[in-house]
Each structure stands twice: as structure tokens, then as C-alpha cells.
Image: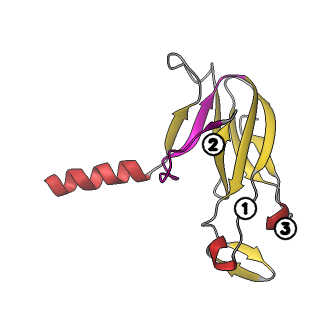
């Protein structure tokens, strides 16, 4: 029985969850904007505030922000297979590559859901983030 409880706790800790990036009480989904990570882009901070505790990179994958302008900094996810020079690599560490931090500014709207992703067609060393409004 104790083993089952430990397994459930581990599975809950390993899955992504939402992090509130504003002060005050929890607000309804029509009062906030929801920003989620794609499979290839990891958010590292929002408005200068770190979003992930050190050594817990997969704890959060969705962020709740108040409507209005926000600055997002992100990197490419280092554990996704990427095409580079015709070959596929499981991690950037295999090829000695570290993703540059990229910044994007966006005016978020209440009641909307967004996803940050990498613009298609760019070399991974020159990648640029884009934020897609999934509510449309």
C-alpha cells in the first residue's frame, strides 16, 4: 500500500502543472491568460522572474499571467531530437550545443490560451520564439 502511494506521488510530481505568475488570490480562467510550453521550447522566466525551481525542470509547463504586456525568455528544450546537418541527435549535449536564450514580448488577453513555440524553418542555432494564440 505504501508503495502504491509513493508511486502516485512520484507520477504527480513528474507531470507538468500550472504555475501562477501573479500576486493575490487565484482568478478564474476568463480573468487571466494561460501560457503553455511546446515540446521544443522551455520557458525560463516571465517578466524577469524565474519560473522553475533549480533542478526541477519539468515541474511546470503551463503559466497563468494577468492580461497585458509580458516579457518571456526561453530556450530550446535540450532533450528533444532535432535535425541538424541531416542527422538526428537525442540531446544537444551530444553535439556540444547549448541553446541561446531568446526573448519575446507579447500583450496577453484575458480568457486566451497561448503556446510558445519555435519558428519553423530556422536552423536550431538561429531559432526564434513565437507565441501562438490557441483561442482563435
Label 1 environment density (alpha carbons within 10 Å; few <14, some 14–19, many ≥20):
some
**Residue 6, horizontal then vertical, whole percent:** 24, 53
What's the mark number on residue 99?
A: 1
| Callout 2: SS | strand
Look at 82% across and 59% down and name the residue there: 127
Q: Is residue 95 above or below residue 121?
A: below
- Residue sitting farthest toward the left: 1
Q: Is residue 51 left or right of residue 33?
A: left
Q: In this view, does 128 lie to the left or right of 61?
A: right
Report the mark closest to the observer, 3 or 1.
1
Report the mark closest to the observer, 2 or 3.
3
Closer to the N terminus: mark 2 or mark 3?
A: 2
Q: In this view, does 125 lie to the left or right of 72?
A: right
Q: Mark 3 points at which residue?
A: 123
Q: Examine the structure image and report whether residue 65 is included in the region drawn in magenta.
A: yes
**Residue bounds of the magenta highlight:** 49-67
Q: Is residue 132 left or right of residue 64?
A: right
Amino acid at each position: 500500500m505504501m508503495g502504491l502511494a509513493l508511486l502516485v506521488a512520484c507520477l504527480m510530481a513528474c507531470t507538468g502543472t500550472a504555475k501562477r505568475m501573479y500576486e493575490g488570490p487565484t482568478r478564474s480562467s476568463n480573468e487571466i491568460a494561460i501560457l503553455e510550453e511546446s515540446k521544443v521550447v522551455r520557458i525560463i522566466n516571465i517578466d524577469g522572474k524565474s519560473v522553475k525551481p533549480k533542478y526541477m525542470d519539468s515541474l511546470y509547463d503551463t503559466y497563468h499571467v494577468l492580461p497585458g504586456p509580458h516579457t518571456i525568455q526561453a530556450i530550446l528544450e535540450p532533450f528533444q531530437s532535432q535535425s541538424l546537418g541531416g542527422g538526428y541527435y537525442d540531446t544537444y549535449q551530444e553535439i556540444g550545443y547549448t541553446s541561446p536564450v531568446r526573448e519575446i514580448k507579447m500583450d496577453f488577453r484575458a480568457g486566451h490560451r497561448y503556446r510558445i513555440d519555435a519558428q519553423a524553418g530556422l536552423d536550431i542555432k538561429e531559432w526564434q520564439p513565437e507565441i501562438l494564440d490557441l483561442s482563435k
